[in-house]
Image (cartoon, helix red, strand yellow):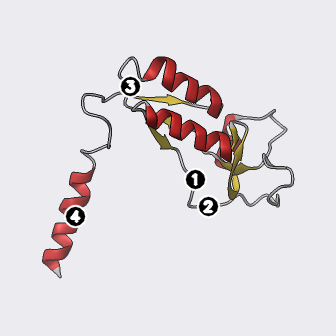
Amino acid sequence: MKFFLLLSLIGFCWAQYDPHTQYGRTAIVHLFEWRWVDIAKECERYLAPNGFAGVQVSPPNENIVVHSPSRPWWERYQPISYKICSRSGNEDEFRDMVNRCNNVGVRIYVDAVINHMCGVGAQAGQSSTCG
């Protein structure tokens, strides 16, 4: 059992050295708050031709809409469901962006919020980015 735990620990530590990018590409850019359609175009027109390895994108899931202050950046980190719809676009646009970027060798890394849901009383589809 101790040997298995030691091997697991070594494996997890070694995994950080393989970001699954194409050979020779190492730079990752964070396109914070960009729309999915704009990221897809950026992958094809600039990032891939200039050797970028990947793009980190803002959380894609449905979140509350904060009106005061007017639509702050941090509302993206107040999820209320796992539906993919935000001010960056919908699920179809997200899927298209991932496919188009991957087709030109640029990987997508999602800033995912999976460990909590917002507790302000908003419900999915009401006062949210999906509704």
Above or below: residue 25 compared with residue 114: above
Q: Amino acid at mark 3?
A: Phe
Q: Nearer the viewer, residue 17 or 71?
A: 17
Point out the tag, 3 or 1, that comes first from the N-terminus. 3
Amino acid under disc 1:
Val
What numbered label is drawn on residue 116? 2
What residue does disc 1 label?
A: 113
Give the residue at mark 4. Answer: 9
Quarter location, residue 92: top right
How packed mark 4 is, by other alpha carbons closer than 10 Å (few <14, some 14-19, many 20 or more), is few
Q: Earlier in the sequence, mark 3 or mark 2?
A: 3
Disc 1 versus disc 4: distance between alpha carbons?
25 Å
Describe residue 102's horizontal placement relative to residue 130 as left or right. Answer: left
Residue lying at 21% horizontally and 60% vertically, measured from the top left: 11
Disc 3 to disc 4: CB gap under 8 Å: no
Q: CA distance from mark 3 to mark 4?
A: 30 Å
Between discs 2 and 4, the one toward the N terminus: 4
Q: What residue lies at 71% left-to-right and 51% top-to-bottom? A: 62
